[in-house]
Amino acid sequence: MKLVSLCLKKYTMLVIIVCFSNGLVLASNSPTNEEERYRKIIDSIEGYFTEALKSTYSTDVAEEAYISFMNSYFNTFVSSDGLTNFHLNLTVDDRVKEITKELMTFNQENGYCLFPDFRYVESEDKVEELRSSTQSPNVVYVYSHAYSSEEDYYEKLNKRHSVSFAREVSCFEKLDPVNTLTSKVINEQMDYTGEVGFLNLAALYIKGNAKDELANPEVQRIISVIFWKLICAQSGVKFRI
């Protein structure tokens, strides 16, 4: 009887060890935390943005909402009033701040996942010194007489109707739709100015021949990320927290 009891104890201990070990193995073989976190952030952005467009333009069809948004943005921007009277119906809660905080703290060891980490410095000499040193490829050092201070630079950066992407990282590659005119224009703008202009992108669908691409969920996804900065502005949340 004692022998049977001893064997059972050893078997139980073996099962516990195996289960624990397998748990570690399964954890290591699952998608990385960074990949899962990235997917959830982008899903949150797209979900909130599409919800806001559907509410603003009174439709349950995503394609119709995105078409209406692009028309409204383009026509309002080029009017004499600019964007003063352009507003989206946004849900009043803390989601915009929470999503933006996640977006801007993602993968910090290499800078932001999607957006370069702009850092204003106090002199041209300091810029050259920092640029020549070994730094993360996603860090961009900036100095210009156009800005009176670091605070002035970041304030104007938030007000610009454009965004820059860190295209070398895998996050942008996963987000960027392939074989579309949208993708081509985004990359051309990045090559030429280092930024994706909101008005230029809207013109692609209004004045260009890419209106049909607004039915593509991948295109809707990247539009939601590009224009997230607009959501932040209308919610009173800094794009770069």
Image: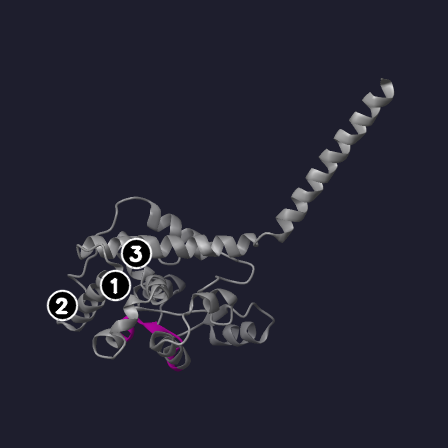
Q: Amino acid at mark 3?
A: Phe
Viewer-side residue, 149 vs 45: 45
Comparing labels 1 and 3, the label whose residue is closer to the camera:
1
> What SS does tag 3 mark?
helix
* Separation (CA) of disc 1 from disc 3: 13 Å
Magenta region, residue range? 192-201
Vertical relation: 126 (above or below) 97: below
User: Is residue 91 shown left or right of residue 222?
Assistant: left
Q: Amino acid at mark 2?
A: Asp
Q: Residue at x 30, y 71 (%)?
A: 213
Q: Which residue matches tag 3?
A: 49
* Separation (CA) of disc 2 from disc 3: 24 Å
> What SS does tag 2 mark?
loop
Vertical relation: 80 (above or below) 45: below
Compare marks 1 and 3 and give the one earlier in the sequence: 3
Q: Residue at x 58, y 69 (%)?
A: 135
User: Is residue 161 shown left or right of residue 8?
Assistant: left
Tell me if mark 1 has few (under 14), some (14-19) or many (20+) residues whose alpha carbon lies within 10 angstroms of its own: many
* Separation (CA) of disc 2 from disc 1: 27 Å
> What SS does tag 1 mark?
helix
> Where in the figure is residue 27, as x and y percent of width and height?
62, 47
Q: Which residue matches tag 1?
A: 63
> Where in the figure is residue 187, as x and y percent of width and height?
40, 77
Residue 97 visible in the shown view: yes
Q: Amino acid at mark 1?
A: Glu
Q: Which residue matches tag 2?
A: 81
Quadrant containing the C terminus is: bottom left
Q: Quadrant of residue 31?
A: bottom right
User: Which SS does the magenta portion mostly show?
Assistant: helix
> Where in the figure is residue 166, as x and y percent of width and height?
46, 69
Residue 230: mark in rendering: none
> Where in the figure is residue 61, as x and y percent of width and height?
23, 58
